[in-house]
């Protein structure tokens, strides 16, 4: 599996940097954001290093599909009120104009009662 030794999220996915883990399988790692914007705020990442959504190709379609299907399940498990009264927001900042700070593709999943800090 391709990893970048200098990437903070590769280190989190491999356990070299500790995190509050939400979910893990062979391909996907999910953990709480260190600086939450909302009552529920976790990050979903592929374990393989993909720098951003801009690098997603057909070879990643199955992985991204699995992440997308997993998101609503984890959102409710983590305390988001069920749809439609509650729900959640998925954000994938991509590139400089997209506001991306960590260059390992990640999806923010946020929910819980408003107001939120941002988002
Ligand atoms: P971006 O701006 O790239 O979309 O979001 C990066 C997110 O990663 C931010 O919300 C930030 O709080 C989170 N983050 C950065 N470093 C760490 C860390 O070491 N551990 C955890 N759990 N989250 C981090
Ligand atoms: Zn990485």
Image (tube, rainbow, N blue to C red):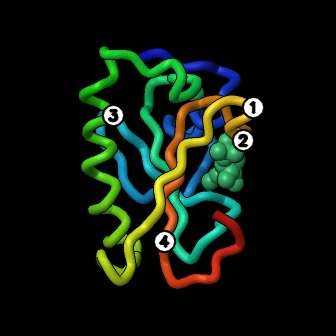
Q: Which residue is mark 3?
A: 64
- Residue located 73% across and 38% down the image: 101
Mark 1–mark 3 Cα distance, whole angstroms, equals 22 Å
Category of crowding for the residue at label 2, using alpha-carbon neighbours closer than 10 angstroms: few (below 14), some (14–19), many (at least 20): few
Q: Which residue is mark 2?
A: 99
Look at the numbered discs 1 and 4 and tell me whether their residues touch, using CB distance below 8 Å.
Answer: no
Q: Which residue is mark 1?
A: 96
- Residue located 44% across and 21% down the image: 56
Specify which label sits upstream in the sequence, 1 or 4.
1
Label 1 element class: loop
Label 4 element class: strand
Of badges 3 and 2, nearer the viewer stands 2
Mark 3–mark 4 Cα distance, whole angstroms, equals 21 Å
Ligand 1 within 8 Å of the CB at mark 1: no
- Across and down, in percent, residue 16 comes to 59, 38
Whether residue 58 is situated above or below residue 24 in the rendered picture: above
Specify which label sits upstream in the sequence, 3 or 4.
3
């Amino acid at each position: 599996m391709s990893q970048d030794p200098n990437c903070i999220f590769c280190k989190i996915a491999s356990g070299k940097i500790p995190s509050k883990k939400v979910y893990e399988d062979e391909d996907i790692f999910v953990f709480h954001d260190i600086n939450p914007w909302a009552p529920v705020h976790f990050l979903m990442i592929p374990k393989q290093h993909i720098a951003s959504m801009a690098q997603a190709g057909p070879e990643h379609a199955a992985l991204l599909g699995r992440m997308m299907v997993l998101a609503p399940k984890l959102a409710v498990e983590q305390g988001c009120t069920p749809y439609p009264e509650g729900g959640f927001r998925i954000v994938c900042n991509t590139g400089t104009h997209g506001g991306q700070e960590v260059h390992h593709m990640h999806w923010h999943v946020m929910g819980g009662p408003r107001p939120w800090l941002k988002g």
